[in-house]
Image (cartoon, grey):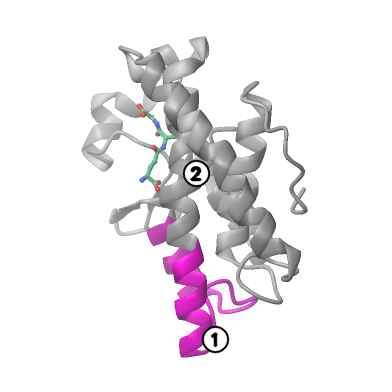
Amino acid sequence: MKIYDGGRAPNPRRVQIFLKEKGIEIETQQLDLNTHEYRSQEMLARNPTATVPFLELDDGTVISETIAICRYIEELHLEPNMFGNTSLERATIEMWSRRIEFDFFLRVAHSFRHLHPAAEVLEGEQIPDWGRKNQKLAIEYLDILDAQLAHNQFIAGDRFCVADITAIVAIQFLNQHGLRCRKKVCLI
Ligand SMILES: N[C@@H](CCC(=O)N[C@@H](CS)C(=O)NCC(=O)O)C(=O)O
């Protein structure tokens, strides 16, 4: 198996953190986002969505999408469990994962991609109004995380799970790119 990675880009980081939590190492090849290495003919033949990360199995099968990759790894390496053990736990983790991915992580990503000069190479035409709107919504979302973490040690209950990884990576991304959050979040 081989992971095609994108350095410090947020989705590849989610997979790398997931692997660390599982305590496993998979051969990794870095693709440079700035030079569009992942858009080469060779890479598009593997992953036509032109994104990283993606996982290539030994028989050449490719799995892209961060959560699909994590789910595949979870089934190969059951412990520590990251997606839930019981029906209720699985549903709760899925609920928070989707909330955080759609309502927070993607908003942080849009704000970076439409406001930060370094993202022009990825985005092409940037739409600053869309970036500012997403930045505002991402910062507002911190209130929801604050409220959830006021009475839970972790996002989806009493232990670290895949939803926490998505939240941590999004919060760090929000901070790192000068899209500063002024609110205090217990998670970091
Ligand atoms: N839905 C995909 C998104 C992957 C994604 O957007 N990756 C970014 C890096 S964080 C990327 O490859 N961007 C390249 C581009 O937009 O051209 C996932 O969950 O893995």
- Amino acid type of disc 2? Phe
Report the residue that reaches farthest toward the bottom.
86
User: Image quadrant of residue 147?
Assistant: bottom right
Identify the image quadrant of the N terminus.
bottom left
User: Image quadrant of residue 98?
Assistant: bottom left
Q: Residue at x 61, y 33 (%)?
A: 174
Residue 97 shown in magenta: no
As helix, strand or loop, the secondary structure at mark 2 comes to: helix
Residue of label 1:
85
Q: Nearer the viewer, residue 118 or 57?
A: 118
Please give the range of residues in magenta: 67-96
- Amino acid type of disc 1? Asn
State the image coordinates of residue 44 (x, y, percent, origin top left): 25, 33
Q: Nearer the viewer, residue 179 or 151?
A: 151
Question: Label 1 crowding class (10 Å Cα cut-off): few <14, some 14-19, many 20+?
Answer: few
Whether label 1 lies within 8 Å of ligand 1 gets the answer no
Instruction: Give residue 105's mark.
Output: 2
Q: Residue at x 53, y 82 (%)?
A: 89
User: Image quadrant of residue 159?
Assistant: bottom right
State the image coordinates of residue 103 (x, y, percent, origin top left): 44, 48
Residue 148 appears anywhere in the view: yes
Q: CA distance from mark 1 to mark 2?
A: 25 Å
